[in-house]
């Protein structure tokens, strides 16, 4: 379970009367992250953490057994009027409560509670604000063990991606395919006790122009001399509360990178480095940047280099127990993430450009510690050459 005392202190410091978490049929994974585990329940359930006082769980009579081991004060309801009565007992007219709601759905990762439920809470006299910053404080920050697990996973991914390039080199003349390389990586994950939910991405030539291309046996392309190769892989250690690493590297199956590919790679690499420098310089000034500011920094550079139309996704995402987690994203494009990159947050920096013929992405992992931003993954500085 999350640290209730820390959450209450945060609520008090930010003039919030409480954090009201709600779930129905697993619509809000943040609810279960707060409780520290998931359970199969069939009726609406609520978890209220007040700025002052004890937290309260509101659950239907048929579901209360799923929460009995948590040691929480529990209000049990049977019908809808009963549920509203219990909500009315914990909420007061004029209170301001945070919920997994985002005005105009500006942050989809936080926008988990339906409009009708927000209306219900408002009808009881409470004002509702977004819990985005509360969620980042309570769930998005890594403790030391998690930070260590993230760095360890990222380092292992760096080893595996280079082993994958060696695998391609050794099998280039025998018809190795994108899917073959995926299978090689998945076997390496098993051997190193790494787990993942999907992937990896192994994309050749025009396939690398699709940011989320994932080969299947039916779509997989053979890798030949003269091909451009992009590999994106993500995984975490096979232990409780482990945190994902997520990196992307590129290679060329030949002795010399073609000019168009080299130019695109250099622009992407420089945008990545510029974003990291921007965060580091701000930290030295005592400033924690907002996610959108870092995205804009890299995006403006790519646009000024003539590739703006080809950078079609946000600059980066937070890392946690899920590969795309609940803290700040580096984003001024898909959203405008105003959350700050504060200590305890792990995230990716992954600019990319995607053209019909090929795409380039360079992805690193960064952890914002109390001493400043630290890169936790290997960093690609040159295109890997896979000579036959």
Image (tube, grey):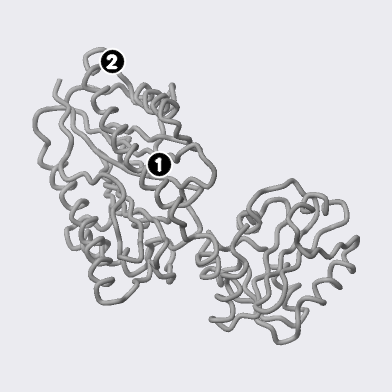
Which of the pair 233/235 is nearer the observer?
Answer: 235
Query: What residue is rendered at 71% in x and 81% in y?
Result: 126
x and y, in percent, of residue 189 in the image: 42, 30
Please state, as top left, top right, bottom left or bottom right, where the C terminus lies in the image.
top left
Residue 374 located left or right of residue 20: left
Query: What residue is rendered at 90% in x and 62% in y?
Result: 79
Query: What residue is rendered at 42% in x and 46% in y?
Result: 149
The picture quadrant where one finds residue 72 is: bottom right
Say above or below: 180 vs 50: above
Q: Which residue is mark 2?
A: 175
Q: Secondary structure at mark 2?
A: loop
Identify the mark nearer the N-term, 2 or 1.
Answer: 2
x and y, in percent, of residue 331 in the image: 38, 63
Residue 340 located left or right of residue 132: left
Query: What residue is rendered at 77% in x and 53% in y?
Result: 67
Label 2 with label 1: CB-CB less than 8 Å = no
Q: Which residue is mark 1?
A: 212
What whole-number distance in Å separates the C-alpha atoms at marks 2 and 1? 23 Å
The picture quadrant where one finds residue 180 is: top left
Please state, as top left, top right, bottom left or bottom right, where the N terminus lies in the image.
bottom right
Say above or below: 52 vs 293: below
Which of the pair 379/26 is nearer the observer?
Answer: 379
Q: Secondary structure at mark 1?
A: loop
Which of the pair 66/263 is nearer the observer?
Answer: 66
CA neighbours of label 2 inside 10 A, class few (<14), some (14 to 19), many (20+): few
């Amino acid at each position: 379970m999350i640290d209730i005392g820390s959450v209450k202190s945060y609520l008090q410091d930010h003039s919030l009367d409480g954090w009201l978490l709600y779930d129905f049929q697993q619509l809000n994974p943040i609810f279960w992250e707060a409780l520290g585990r998931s359970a199969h329940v069939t009726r609406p359930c609520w978890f209220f953490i007040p700025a002052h006082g004890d937290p309260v769980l509101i659950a239907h009579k048929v579901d209360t057994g799923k929460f009995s081991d948590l040691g929480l004060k529990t209000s049990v309801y049977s019908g809808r009027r009963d549920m509203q009565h219990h909500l009315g007992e914990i909420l007061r007219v004029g209170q301001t409560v945070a919920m997994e709601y985002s005005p105009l759905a500006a942050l989809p990762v936080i926008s988990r509670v339906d409009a009708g439920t927000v209306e219900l809470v408002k009808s009881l006299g409470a004002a509702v604000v977004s819990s985005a910053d509360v969620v980042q404080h309570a769930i998005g920050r890594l403790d030391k063990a998690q930070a260590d697990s993230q760095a360890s996973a990222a380092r292992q991914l760096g080893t595996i991606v280079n082993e994958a390039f060696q695998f391609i080199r050794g099998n280039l003349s025998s018809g190795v395919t994108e899917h073959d390389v995926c299978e090689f990586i998945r076997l390496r994950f098993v051997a190193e006790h790494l787990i993942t939910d999907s992937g990896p991405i192994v994309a050749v030539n025009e396939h690398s122009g699709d940011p989320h291309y994932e080969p299947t046996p039916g779509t997989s392309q053979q890798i030949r001399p003269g091909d451009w190769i992009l590999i994106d892989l993500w995984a975490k250690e096979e232990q409780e509360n482990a945190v994902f690493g997520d990196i992307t590297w590129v290679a060329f199956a030949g002795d010399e990178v073609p000019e168009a590919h080299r130019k695109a790679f250099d622009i992407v690499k420089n945008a990545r480095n510029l974003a990291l420098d921007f965060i580091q310089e701000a930290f030295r000034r005592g400033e924690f940047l907002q996610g959108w500011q870092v995205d804009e920094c890299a995006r403006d550079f790519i646009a000024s280099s003539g590739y703006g139309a080809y950078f079609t996704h946000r600059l980066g995402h937070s890392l946690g127990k899920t590969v795309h987690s609940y803290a700040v994203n580096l984003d001024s494009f898909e959203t405008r993430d105003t959350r700050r990159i504060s200590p305890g947050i792990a995230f990716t920096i992954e600019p990319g450009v995607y053209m019909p013929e090929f795409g380039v992405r360079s992805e690193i992992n960064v952890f914002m510690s109390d001493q400043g931003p630290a890169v936790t993954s290997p960093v690609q500085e040159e295109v890997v050459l896979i000579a036959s």
